């Protein structure tokens, strides 16, 4: 067991955990941030995606020791005072989920994509999102949600996302 | 060998279950003031259970409850569960419609065995056609009760009053009362039976519209708590030490290293070997530190599967239901047919791989057990738990938070039982989440199958004879919808090497793959366009309409595909749903296949929520393309060889064709379920398109593992 001070969604949170424990389990089990999901624990499904210093990362593949010192953003840290980000709102507007289990990871990956490519091509969407599995097969709607968010961000000139 | 039924929707309970009479629960007291409407003696209940309930007595109690509080809030209690198929929204729409209240006043309480009436389970596309009418009946009856109560209050005739927006109004006097006010906080209980009048779909205002998913916001903010997100005070985390292979028996286990780890307790309880620890990571490490030796008997591999199945008949190769048709008639007609064909098709084992693996949190309070778990059968799992611990079912409560889906894969309660056994041993609540590898290995699979078809036709395109024998995969969707005078259609149960069970659409996918591929072969053999050949032999109007609708949108017959491109069409009907699928594929000279486009037409009666329906039908088609092209479980010596997403390929963004879904709305027909049958057309449509592109006929699913044809 070791002590870490994690920077999660803008708050400094002390945790005690084995240093090699994946960040995923620290977030979920020690900080009660359950929005980050376990889908495989092998870096193959994207359900556990978070931002580390603004970059999307698979939290099942990052140890807590490695994550300490980085700014961590989880799905719970996206909306501000109840206002959804354009990507979150677009997922609602397009109904881009069925069971919703992949949704957190999809939204984080899509947010990262739109930061890098505000007007992504089809190929850029596929490249950025291919590591995220939606077993319910909601892919076409997720693509539609990404396009909708992209448009909305272009009109509003802001990504509404903190790093 | 596991005794899980291959087709739970047909044979709901092969596992031993006991029906415990429902007690009148405290719930009825807890409900407080207001109107509680119960429906009893509904013929629909009997219909849902079908004729296959065996020795189990049908519940005599109520199918669902609707409560209207003094504040006008409406709460609907149903044992059905939400697994992503959107019934939390669509069932509420039906209630809002009949009750004449705003959609947002309704709360659905679902799948909690202490709060909701008994329910067989959420599968077989039964929620919409059975629970839908039950709830509509009750809501309509509730509206009647409210109208009558208001009429008494105002000393007038109920027929003079109107209901709308949660109020009863007397147009003559202008008097108006909210539903909650009518009950005056008194406790009114009504049990209704019979068939109150229902609003025809043509007049629907809330039902039939694209109401967004009720708790959509909770999913995009990460707030929704799935079963694996449940947490209890003092909870520990469990891990099971699994056998080295199926049917393995424990020879020895050295647990000393694990026991030395901080906070770790090793649990050995008969055949169960597991650990609990204060953290899930520690539990995983501890389970890995247990050195166990297992005796695993020799078992067959997937390479031998399709010779094994027909060689090992079960139950003398007979299904419980009678075969349809006669062999003599088929033989005779075949002999006289101008064109004859005989082919064999195979379907590999595939996994459901729901993104949320099986998960359970179990908590004991004395002899009372509460388990939160993801399952399509909360009452079934409750009974499994009661049996496992030899306690009455009344001492077990199963709560099913809306889960990360199941696709037919979460009918059984093994994870719940494991969590409860660990919790009992630890004396604390325990959470158990199966790893992806466990989910791929220790759940159950969609049955593999071998299908043999013999057929005959006349040169003018008339189908004359049809024989369809299905080994192991199941009888669902086995009957041919085309007109044919001489046929034999038979499911032949066999012994099977892997644990197998329900899956979205059951065997309808396998049977449609074989049948609709074969029909295509026959069309080519008589030199007819595959769509024309189908229509020539099809008098089922609903199926004709979806074929024509899909073909028209796809542009079938309008243009010749370019070199290396092919078009295919397939369709069918099952569980009240009618589907036709057109596919366009491209195969490059090296044999690499790309699915370019899918157009799917769908009809299932009156549409309750077009948005949710479109999502389901599209999702089914996309899930179906995985099994069609590349999903396949590899196994050997009692082990799964590809139990990870890295090796077991599921459809991803890069596999997406353009997908178009056309919904045919038949407001004049009862609504059927839509979660399953949308999957059946994809595989044969792709197979037929591949033939059109390459003149190669692929008869084995998956057709292109590794994205290469037949590799
Ligand atoms: S859980 Fe981390 S990638 Fe699947
Ligand atoms: S919505 Fe179920 S996994 Fe994506």
Image (spheres, coloured by chain):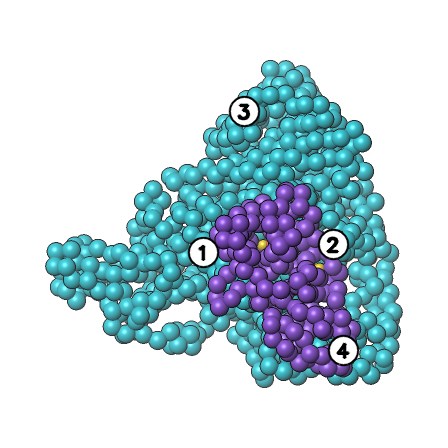
Chain colours: A purple, B cyan
Q: Is residue B102 above or below residue B398?
A: above
- Residues at circles 3 and 2 in contact by the CB criterion of under 8 Å: no
Q: Residue at x 51, y 33 (%)?
A: B546
Q: Which of the two discs, 4 and 3, sits closer to the camera?
A: 4
Among the 4 quarters of the image, the one containing residue B341: top right
- Per the image, the residue denoted by label 3 is B535
Q: In this orientation, does residue B83 appear?
A: no
Label 1 to label 4: alpha-carbon separation: 43 Å
The answer to whether B280 appears left or right of B367 in the picture is: right
The answer to whether B420 appears left or right of B41 in the picture is: right
The circle on residue B89 is 1
Q: Chain of mark 4?
A: A
- Residues at circles 4 and 3 in contact by the CB criterion of under 8 Å: no
Q: Is residue B672 above or below residue B421?
A: above
Q: Chain of mark 2?
A: B
Q: Is mark 2 within 8 Å of ligand 1?
A: yes
| Front-most of residues B111 and B450 | B111
Q: Residue B76, how many percent across, how many down?
A: 40, 63
- Per the image, the residue denoted by label 4 is A18
Q: Is mark 4 within 8 Å of ligand 1?
A: no
- Per the image, the residue denoted by label 2 is B645
For marks 2 and 1, the one nearer the N-term is: 1
Q: Chain of mark 3?
A: B
For marks 1 and 3, the one nearer the N-term is: 1
């Amino acid at each position: 067991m070791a002590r870490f001070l994690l920077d999660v969604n803008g708050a400094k949170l002390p945790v005690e955990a084995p240093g090699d424990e994946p960040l995923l389990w620290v977030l979920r089990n020690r900080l009660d941030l359950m929005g980050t999901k376990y889908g495989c624990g092998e870096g193959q499904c994207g359900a556990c995606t978070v931002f580390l210093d603004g970059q999307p990362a698979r939290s099942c593949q990052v140890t807590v020791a490695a994550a300490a010192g980085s700014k961590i953003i989880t799905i719970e840290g996206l909306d501000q005072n109840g206002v959804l980000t354009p990507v979150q709102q677009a997922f609602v507007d397009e109904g881009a989920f069925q069971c919703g289990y992949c949704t957190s990871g999809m939204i984080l990956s899509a947010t990262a994509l739109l930061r890098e490519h505000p007007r992504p091509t089809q190929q850029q969407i596929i490249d950025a999102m291919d590591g995220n599995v939606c077993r319910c097969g909601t892919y076409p709607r997720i693509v539609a949600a990404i396009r909708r968010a992209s448009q909305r961000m272009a009109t509003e000139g802001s990504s509404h996302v903190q790093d | 060998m596991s005794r899980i039924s291959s087709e739970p929707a047909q044979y709901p309970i092969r596992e031993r279950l006991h029906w415990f009479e429902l007690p009148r629960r405290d719930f009825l007291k807890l409900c407080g003031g207001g109107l509680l409407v119960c429906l009893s003696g509904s013929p629909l209940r009997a219909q849902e259970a079908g004729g296959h309930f065996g020795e189990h007595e049908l519940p005599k109690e109520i199918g669902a409850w609707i409560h209207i509080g003094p504040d006008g809030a409406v709460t609907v209690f149903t044992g059905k569960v939400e697994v992503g198929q959107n019934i939390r929204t669509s069932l509420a729409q039906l209630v809002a419609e009949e009750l004449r209240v705003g959609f947002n006043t309704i709360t659905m309480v679902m799948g909690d065995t202490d709060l909701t009436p008994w329910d067989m389970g959420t599968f077989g596309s039964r929620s919409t056609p059975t629970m839908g009418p039950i709830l509509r009946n009750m809501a309509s009856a509730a509206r009647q009760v409210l109208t009558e109560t208001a009429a008494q209050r105002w000393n007038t005739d109920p027929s003079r009053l109107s209901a709308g927006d949660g109020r009863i109004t007397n147009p003559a006097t202008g008097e108006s009362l909210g539903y909650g006010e009518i009950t005056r906080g008194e406790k009114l209980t009504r049990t209704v039976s019979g068939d109150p009048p229902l609003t025809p779909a043509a007049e629907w205002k809330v039902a039939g519209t694209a109401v967004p998913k009720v708790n959509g916001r909770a999913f995009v903010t990460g707030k929704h708590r799935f079963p694996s997100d449940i947490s209890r005070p003092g909870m520990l985390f469990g891990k099971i030490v699994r056998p080295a292979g199926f049917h393995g028996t424990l020879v020895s286990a050295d647990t000393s290293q694990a026991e030395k780890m901080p906070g770790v307790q090793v649990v050995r309880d008969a055949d169960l070997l597991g650990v609990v620890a204060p953290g899930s990571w520690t539990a995983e490490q501890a389970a890995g530190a247990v050195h166990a030796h297992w005796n695993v008997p020799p078992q067959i591999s997937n390479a031998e599967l399709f010779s094994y199945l027909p060689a090992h008949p079960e139950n003398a190769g007979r299904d419980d239901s009678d075969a349809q048709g006669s062999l003599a008639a088929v033989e005779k007609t075949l002999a006289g047919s101008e064109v004859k064909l005989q082919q064999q098709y195979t379907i590999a084992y595939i996994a459901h791989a729901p993104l949320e693996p099986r998960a359970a949190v179990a908590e004991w309070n004395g002899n009372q057990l509460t388990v939160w778990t993801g399952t399509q059968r909360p009452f079934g799992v409750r009974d499994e738990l009661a049996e496992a611990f030899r306690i009455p079912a009344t001492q077990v409560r199963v709560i099913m938070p809306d889960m990360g889906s199941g696709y037919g894969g979460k009918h059984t309660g093994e994870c719940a039982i494991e969590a409860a056994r660990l919790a009992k041993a630890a004396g604390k609540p325990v959470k158990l989440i199966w790893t992806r590898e466990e989910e791929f290995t220790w759940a159950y699979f969609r049955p593999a199958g071998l299908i043999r078809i013999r057929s005959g036709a006349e040169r003018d395109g008339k189908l004359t004879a049809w024989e369809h024998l299905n080994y192991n995969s199941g009888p669902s969707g086995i009957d041919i919808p085309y007109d044919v005078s001489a046929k034999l259609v038979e499911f032949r149960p066999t012994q099977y090497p892997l644990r197998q069970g329900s899956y979205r659409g059951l065997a309808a996918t396998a049977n449609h793959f074989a049948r609709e591929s074969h029909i295509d072969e026959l069309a080519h053999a008589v030199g007819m366009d595959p769509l024309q050949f189908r229509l020539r032999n099809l008098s089922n109007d609903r199926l004709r309409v979806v074929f024509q609708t899909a073909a028209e949108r796809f542009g079938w017959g309008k243009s010749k595909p370019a070199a290396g491109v092919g078009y295919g069409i397939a369709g069918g009907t099952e569980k009240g749903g009618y589907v036709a699928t057109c596919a366009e594929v491209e195969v490059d000279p090296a044999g690499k296949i790309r699915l370019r486009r899918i157009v799917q037409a769908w009809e299932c009666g009156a549409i309750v929520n077009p948005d949710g329906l479109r999502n389901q039908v599209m999702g089914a088609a996309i899930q179906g393309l995985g099994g069609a092209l590349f999903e396949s479980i590899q196994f050997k010596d009692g082990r799964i060889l590809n139990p990870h997403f890295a090796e077991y390929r599921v459809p991803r963004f890069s596999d997406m064709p353009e997908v178009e879904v056309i919904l045919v709305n038949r407001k004049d027909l009862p609504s059927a379920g839509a979660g399953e049958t949308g999957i059946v057309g994809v595989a044969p449509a792709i197979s037929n398109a591949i033939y059109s592109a390459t003149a190669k006929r692929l008869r084995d699913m998956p057709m292109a593992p590794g994205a290469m044809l037949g590799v």
